[in-house]
Amino acid sequence: MVLSCQQMRTIMYCEFWNKLSATKCHKKVCEGLGFRTISNDAVKVWFRKCKEGNLDIEDEPHSGCPNGVDCEKLND
């Protein structure tokens, strides 16, 4: 089963509010969804964000390669 980032964050959000530790959350997710579902470090990062008050499950904007190509700019 493949879950989206938002679905994984929703699961972690629920476990965070249920007072589960990041390590126990990781173990529970991997037992239920598969060993390589998410890394322990990713869970720890997300739990840290929750503790800081950032409870948004949506992706944050970030720099990097653009998602699309403007063909008209390429033709110029």
Image: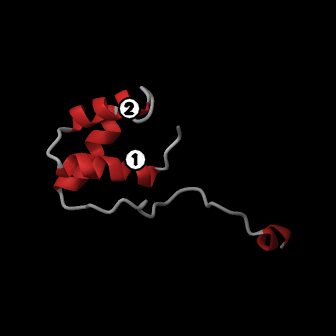
* Left or right relative to 56: residue 73: right
Image quadrant where one finds the C terminus: bottom right
Percent coordinates x, y for residue 67 in the rendering: 63, 60
Give the camera-side residue of 12 and 62: 12
Density class for disc 1 (Cα within 10 Å; few <14, some 14-19, many ≥20) is some
Residue 64 percent location from the top left of the image: 53, 56
Which kind of residue does numbered mark 1 sit on?
Answer: Met
Q: Residue at x 38, y 32 (%)?
A: 32
Instruction: Estimate the spatial distance between the alpha carbons at disc 2 and disc 1, rounded to whole Å.
Output: 12 Å
Front one among 18 and 47: 18
Indicate the quadrant where residue 22 lies.
top left
The structure's colour scheme is secondary structure
Local packing at callout 2 (Cα closer than 10 Å; few below 14, some 14-19, many 20+) is few
| Residue placed furthest toward the right | 75
Q: Which mark is residue 32?
A: 2
Q: Nearer the viewer, residue 29 or 47?
A: 29
Q: Is residue 72 left or right of residue 47?
A: right
First reached walking from the N terminus: tag 2 or tag 1: 1
* Residue at 77%, 72% in the rendered image: 73
Instruction: Where is residue 31? Give x, y as percent.
Output: 35, 27
Q: Which mark is residue 62?
A: none
- Residue matched to label 1: 8
